[in-house]
Amino acid sequence: MISLGGLGTQLGIKLFEATRDKQIDLVARDALSARQIAAFSERIGSIGSAKELIADTEVYTFVMRAFDLEAQIFGKALVRKTLESDISESSALVNRLTDTNIKTMYKTLGFEPGGGGSANFADLDWQSDMVARFKERLVLNNAAEDNEGAGLALDFKAKASGINTWFDVLKDADLGKFMRRALSIPDAVVGVDVDRQAEIFAQKFDITKLKDPAEVDKLVSRFAAVYDVIEGISTQQNSAALTLMQNAVSAGQGGNISIITIDIPIIGKTGYNAYR
């Protein structure tokens, strides 16, 4: 993978976006990921229930990783009950869980309530979309491990079009942190009633603007500037960082990847106590 470590947030975002296709290709060639992609493609069409999905370790792991739920892989009983529940019932398990990724997985898989199958699994276009989702999620997670600021911004960009209300933001920890930084709202707000939090965010930004890619980019730029100041990250785009980016971009266009180790200085923590 092309590391974003040591870079300022804005430069990390630019490097990632310039090399996205190359990084997705590298993910697909990783031995473990390639095996899970192959298993999913070969066997998903024959899986007829949530029980059968969870019994197939490789396919189940693929699905959980695709929806950023890798940390919950071992909760098989809970996942099965969730996928078998009926979302039309307010008391259904899928409606009682707070992780938005679980509900997204439920809707995307489309199992019939009560243990039935899914009409989606035999659809080749649906399968292709799932493989693309899997690769994209792994690349985004790798970016976040290298560079938290860039990871938060890239995750936000990936989810922005699906955000309709402030509650969609507040129930997602990463989106909440991104928005607090981008809108200069102190972290202490998380201790306030959720309805009041929504009001505070609404006073700062019109959430309908997220349907406009230009507004999304503006918000990302604001986030990057604020995040790096608060976290004490130097945004100096020195020659070593720019050389790394140029080489990576060249690699993304078909050249060879040059592995470069760089040491980009960081500045000391600043005194923005409102964010601590």
Image (cartoon, rainbow, N blue to C red):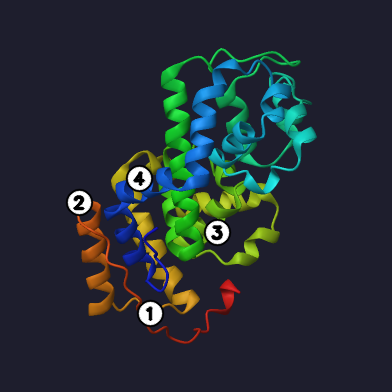
Q: Which residue is mark 3?
A: 177
Vertical placement of residue 174 versus 8, above or below: above
Kind of element beneath mark 2: loop
Q: Which numbered circle lies on residue 234?
A: 1
- Camera-near label (1 vs 3) is 1
Sequence-first disc among 3 and 4: 4
Q: Which numbered circle lies on residue 25?
A: 4
Sequence-first disc among 4 and 1: 4
Q: Is residue 162 visible?
A: no
Kind of element beneath mark 3: helix
- Camera-near label (4 vs 1) is 4
Q: Give the image location of residue 170, x and y in percent.
A: 60, 48
In this view of the protein, which residue sits in the foreground, 87 or 237?
237
Residue name at image x 51 percent, y 24 percent: 42
Is 15 placed left or right of 159 in the picture? left
Vertical placement of residue 46 versus 189, above or below: above
- Camera-near label (3 vs 4) is 4
Label 4–label 1 contact, CB within 8 A: no
Sequence-first disc among 2 and 4: 4
Q: Give the image location of residue 233, x and y in percent.
A: 43, 77
Q: Which numbered circle lies on residue 253?
A: 2
